[in-house]
Amino acid sequence: MLFRDRTDAGEQLAGVIGSLDAKNTIVLALPRGGLPLGVIVAKKYAVSFDIILAKKIGHPTNSEYAIGAVAEGGTPILGEGYVEALHAEWVQEKVPLIQKEMSRKRAIYREILQENQLNDKDVLIVDDGIATGLTMFAAIRAAEEHQPKSVSVAVLVIPKATYGQLKQEVDKVYMLEVPQHFLGGVGAYYEQFPQLTDEQVKEMLKNR
């Protein structure tokens, strides 16, 4: 299945969720790509909306290749096959820089968004797709540190192997595609998949 853009994906994803507890649910979107979908889901079900920041940790020799991920205020996680002892120095070097960048983004978004407490809430983390799953797993674990009532995930597309892992981590997984043969990147499932700027994100938050 090919989706037109993130708006189309958000509308279709919202349609498969079914129902949410309007009084107790908080949608957490993963910026920047998950934000358009999260806004649509939160609006459809009239639930609270916020963001959760997480970012991949690039390989020492290829920054585009993720060896792990870390969420804002969370503990870094490494992908399978990456021995922590071998990459510890690199991770220790990169994580403070990533956290600093996430703090910068948080300050930008907090100009528009009020902070929500996650304690005893039903948390739904939304993204535009999952490839390795590292960023999503980092976000899940960071959310769990706030002792929510439940943590669920809503995402457009997930590789089959990652889907199996994800089901063991969260209460529910809402998705539209679990391909047997993943096309290598989330963008392959969209006709239009532009990178969003901070200014575009701020505009979406103002107009939600």
Image (cartoon, grey):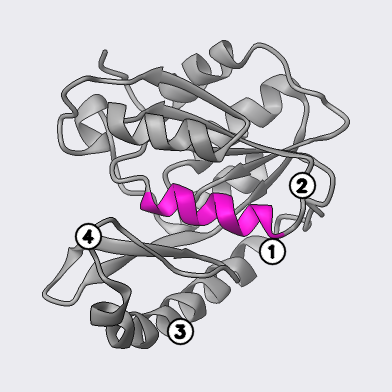
Q: Tell me: residue 65, above or below residue 18.
A: below
Q: Earlier in the sequence, mark 4 or mark 2?
A: 4
User: How far apart, in angstroms, are the residues tagged by discs 1 and 3?
Assistant: 21 Å
Q: Nearer the viewer, residue 165 or 52?
A: 165
The local crowd at label 2, few if under 14, some if 14 to 19, many if 20 or more residues have their Cα within 10 Å, is: some
Answer with the quarter of the image where residue 5 lies.
Answer: top left
Badge 1 marks a residue whose secondary structure is helix
Give the residue number, with chain letter if any, for mark 1.
110
- The answer, for residue 173, to whether it is visible in the render is yes
Picture residue at 69% right of the left edge, 27% below the top? 43
Span highlighted in magenta in the image: 134-145
User: How far apart, in angstroms, are the residues tagged by discs 2 and 1?
Assistant: 21 Å
Q: In the image, is residue 28 part of the stretch drawn in magenta?
A: no
Give the residue number, with chain letter if any, for mark 4.
81
Picture residue at 60% right of the left edge, 16% below the top? 17
User: How far apart, in angstroms, are the residues tagged by discs 2 and 3?
Assistant: 26 Å
The local crowd at label 3, few if under 14, some if 14 to 19, many if 20 or more residues have their Cα within 10 Å, is: few
Q: Earlier in the sequence, mark 3 or mark 4?
A: 4
Q: Tell me: residue 202, above or below residue 124.
A: below
Residue 25 at x, y percent in the picture: 77, 34
